[in-house]
Amino acid sequence: MAFPAISCLVLTLLSMFISLVLSAPTIYNVVSFGAKPDGQTDSAQAFLSAWTKACASMQPATIYVPAGKFALGQVIFIGPCSNKVNVMLNGTLVAPSDYTVLGNKTYWVLFQHVDGLTVSGNGILDGQGTSLWACKASGKSCPLGATTLEFTNSNNVVVSGLTSVNSQMFHIVVNACNNVNMQGVRIIAAGNSPNTNGIHVESSSNVTILNSNIQTGDDCISIGPGTTNLWIENVACGPGHGISIGSLGQNQQEAGVQNVTVKTTNFTDTQNGVRIKSWARPSNGFARNVIFQHVNMMNVQNPIIIDQNYCPSGGCPNQASGVKISNVTYQDIHGTSATEVAVNLNCSSRNPCSIIIMESIMLTYKNQVAKSSCNHASVTSSGSVQPAINCL
């Protein structure tokens, strides 16, 4: 009489086994698709073949990149996919050494229209950008260069543990995405490398950048128009140009930046610390609801700066910036300035900065309290604020 109970148990166990098998991630090793870890053979097609299989999988899929050097030309991974995809990178991806191969392309590795993507591992993306930097330094006519890794029109993205070195242009770009989490990212490029922004976020919402170390030749993190709900925490920056909102106001019709938190960050030997920058021309752009909190500066040229007359080269518009900056809080910012003026608020004469709050600021220059410069801003100070800020 026990047979029905045994049959029921067997069916239950069989059902559980089938469920486990169906839910287990499917793994696609790029080597199985012909990728060569020799650092010379272009493995782009093998990577794309692995992506095609993983993206079509009805179960969560993993693309596995083992140890070794994999040469890659431009690779574009396009969704949408049938389920979540994890790219596990343990090897090194190497861009072409000839910068002209990628130099006129916008990106090297692109993920587009993907929902539920993880790119993780202790792997390296080597943009091999040094020869292009040298070309630009020589004054010759050179291509702009390619971004190393870009995510565009994608949602629910995790980037964890990766290292990007020597990008031709930007290292990582997040464009038109929602719900992106980056953590444990390392970015390395020479302090004089041109336009090698570490992480650039634009037209995106709900992005977090955590526990990362960025050494580069331009902004460690740049925050472009259309960015909302951005959280940056525990980031080390230097060398580089700091963490910058902007440049804004490049276009007359432009989405604003709002709800940005930058906290527990360290800046070492950088050109700027925390910066907001906009072009001096008409624009409907804005930056509001921004918090810079618990920031340490070590030998930073411009620890706190708002520059609404931003113009890095010739042909400056020399007008009044239309970008409206408001509700910006600087709290618990301390350390050393490499210049006498540690706080420089250079706001728009037509649209003065409003509701700028300074709390617990201590910045020194050569073991003395530093100085401040302030134009066209409404500033409220609380607690000890050194240097004191008096606006014109």
Image (spheres, rainbow, N blue to C red):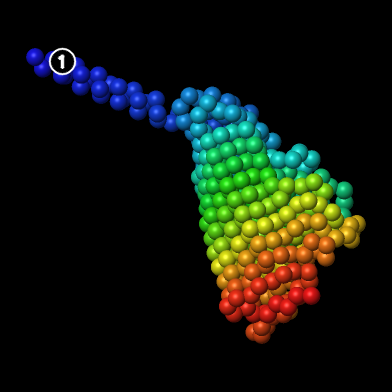
Residue drawn at the location 8% of the way across and 14% of the way down? 1
Residue that label 1 marks: 4
**Residue 142 appears left or right of 288:** right
Name which residue type carries label 1: Pro
| Residue in view at x 64 percent, y 75 percent | 381
Who is closer to the viewer here, 137 or 316?
316
Residue 322 in picture, x, y percent from top left: 81, 56
Observer-nearest residue: 354 or 150? 354
- In this rendering, the answer to whether 328 lies above or below 72 is below
Residue at image x 80%, y 63%?
Answer: 348
Residue 186 in view, yes or no: no
- Residue 271 occupies quadrant: bottom right
Of 130 and 21, nearer the camera is 21
Tell me where residue 44 sits by quadrant: top right
48 left or right of 301 in image: left
- Image spot of residue 43 (x, y percent): 62, 33
